[in-house]
Amino acid sequence: MIRLILSLSILLFSGCGVKESKNTKFENSELVKNEFIPVDSLGIPIYNYDELEPLLNRKDDKTYIVNFWATWCAPCIKELPFFEKINQEGKNNNLEVILVSLDMPSMWKSKLLPFIKTKNIKSKVVVLNDPDQNSWIPKIDKNWSGAIPATLIYNRKKRKFYEQSFTYEMLNKEIQEFK
C-alpha cells in the first residue's frame, strides 16, 4: 500500500516541475532526485497529450502504427521486436511506427534510455508525460481502459484501436487491412 501511495505521489508531482515554452515544447523534465535534464540530453521528445495529439491525427499518405508501452510492462516488451520488424519493413511501404512510452519520469534515465540503447530501437520513441489519464485516454479511444500494451493504427482513410498484445503475424495482418 505504501508503494502504491508513493508511486501515485511521484506521478502526480512529476507534472508539477515541468516548464513549458511558448511553442509548447517541454524545455525540461523532472527526473530522479529533482535533477532536471534537458530533453535534448535525453534524445527523445517528451510530450503532454496536447503535444502528442498531432502524431495521432496525421492526414498524409502514410499508415501510422502507434504503440503505447512501458519498460515495466512484460507483454509490451515481448511485442516490441514485432513493431521494430514492421518499422524496418515498412520504410518503403509508407508505414511509420511510433512507440509512445508511458514510463514515469523517474524511469526515463535509469530504465527507458538504457532499454532503447540495449535493444537498439530504431522506431521513433516519444514519452507521454501527462498525469491526467482520465482526460487523454478516452481521447485516444473512448473504449480504452488504459491498460497496455495498446496500439492505434491509422491512415487518412481508416482508424482502429487495439487494447491487446500482438504477434508479428497478427500485427502484419492488421496492417494489411490499411493498404
Image (cartoon, rainbow, N blue to C red):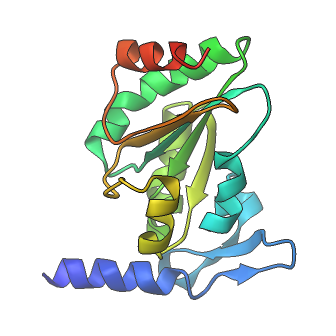
Q: Observer-nearest residue: 113 or 53?
A: 53
Above-or-below relation of 41 to 148: below
Write the residue at 49% across / 32% down. Answer: 119
In which quadrant of the rendered image does the N terminus lie?
bottom left
The residue lying at 57 percent from left, 88 percent from top is 16
Locate residue 89: give its quadrant.
top right
- Measured from the top left, where is residue 131 in percent x and y? 47, 75
Question: In the image, 5: left or right of 65?
Answer: left
Residue 139 image offset from top left, x and y in percent: 52, 60
From this view, report whether residue 146 is shown above or below residue 38: above
The spot of residue 167 in percent (x, y) is: 33, 20
Please say if 151 is above or below 28.
Answer: above
Residue in the image at 41% along x and 50% along y: 70
| Marker count (numbered) | 0
Residue at the farthest right position:
22
**Residue 82 lies in what quarter of the image?**
top left
Which is more toward the observer, 151 or 157? 157
Q: Is residue 159 visible?
A: yes
Residue 42 visible to an observer of this rendering: no
Horizontal and vertical percent for residue 162?
39, 38
**Residue at screen point 65% across, 62% down:** 46
